[in-house]
Amino acid sequence: MSLSSYKPRVAAASVAWLACGLAVACSSSSSTDTPGADASVPPHDATTGADTNAPADQAAPDAGGGDDASDGAATANPAHVGFFSFKQFEAPRWDFGGGFVSNEPTPPPNPYYTCTTSTAGECTLSICTPIDGGPPPPPPPLLVLVNPGDITVTGGTIPAGTKLAAVDGGGNGSSVGAAGVVVVNGDVIRVSAPGSADVPAFALSIVANPTYTVTNPACDAGTCPGVDRTKDYVFTWTGLAQGTLQVAFAYVNGPPLDRIVCNFPGAAGQGTIPSSLLTQFPGTAGIQLEAVSKNVTRAVVGDYGTTIDFTGNYFDRVLPIVN
């Protein structure tokens, strides 16, 4: 889903929900049964190392990845949200999009599933059961994008003058992108705008962490060793110094919402998927393993709780189940 689809006063999902998907986190990780919860996304980003590794030019930054107002420098209006997404794909391709919304809605519950989640270590298991005869979902909200002036992005070899210009009545809700690699690990991406009557001037930044090498599982010509669910599974990698590596286990041709999602500190080089979760994970056809490098910075711009989300390369393999 891209911000290029977001236009002022056009029905669409919320800007904050842009981050929802396999490798970006949005839902909470409780251990209780949550009827109607949206488990189509993994638990909230564990931004260990992300905010504290960002350069210190943030506008009222949150150093802990929690409440935007936790530093006491500014208070966010829950309805005011800014979101910027930078993606550097292995393809290679890069994309940048973003904007500010003045009427961020509360995400509605999922009317079709009831989900149970359980957490162990840095991983959360979600198992969801369909609800027969659930009501239709509510219509998407009408979002109002507001304009802070032209938004400029710099860093690495991003072409000079790359901007998100105001569109459709003054709001920013567009994206830019092109082929090629423009940032490497450690590059600082800076996002800024001159400000307007709606959003003050700001300068935010995030450290890129697109590239890593998976060392376990060691897959030979696409064939990977099997998973014994009675044992902890250790996923290992090299090459990351910032942010998070998000790792997900899902079914092969199974229920789309059932999955284990883990958020491991990138610099750790390894993370463990506990057997206590794996033994609850049903299915015999195989496990779809997906991983992606992430970094997240949060700040308060005026009263807009604002996130910069960096997404790097994806790793995608199928693991047989041996037990």
Image: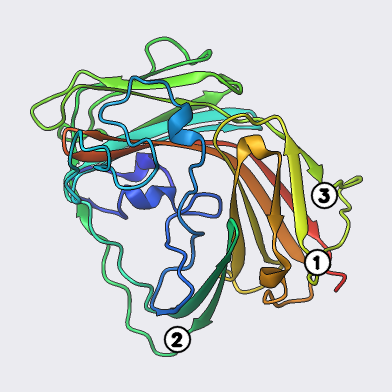
Element carrying mark 3? loop
Q: Nearer the viewer, residue 72 or 180?
A: 72
* Residue 43 falls left or right of residue 234: left
Residue 101, position as x, y percentages in the image: 22, 43
Residue denoted by label 1: 231
Tell me the quadrant of the picture where the C terminus can be found.
Answer: bottom right
Residue denoted by label 2: 131
State how far apart marks 1 and 3 are (Cα).
15 Å
What residue sits 23% from the left and 27% below the top?
166
Residue 133, position as x, y percentages in the image: 39, 90
* Residue 308 falls left or right of residue 285: left
Residue denoted by label 3: 217
Classify 5 as above or below 179: below
Which mark sits nearer the N-terminus, 2 or 1?
Answer: 2
Which mark sits nearer the N-terminus, 1 or 3?
Answer: 3
Which mark sits nearer the N-terminus, 3 or 2?
Answer: 2
Classify 171 as above or below 220: above
Element carrying mark 2? loop
Q: How is the image coloured?
A: rainbow
Element carrying mark 1? loop
Query: Disc number at residue 317?
Result: none
Amino acid beneath label 2: Ile
Q: Nearer the viewer, residue 207 or 265?
A: 265
Of the two numbered discs 1 and 3 in the rendering, the one whose residue sits closer to the viewer: 1
Labels 3 & 2 near each other (Cβ < 8 A): no
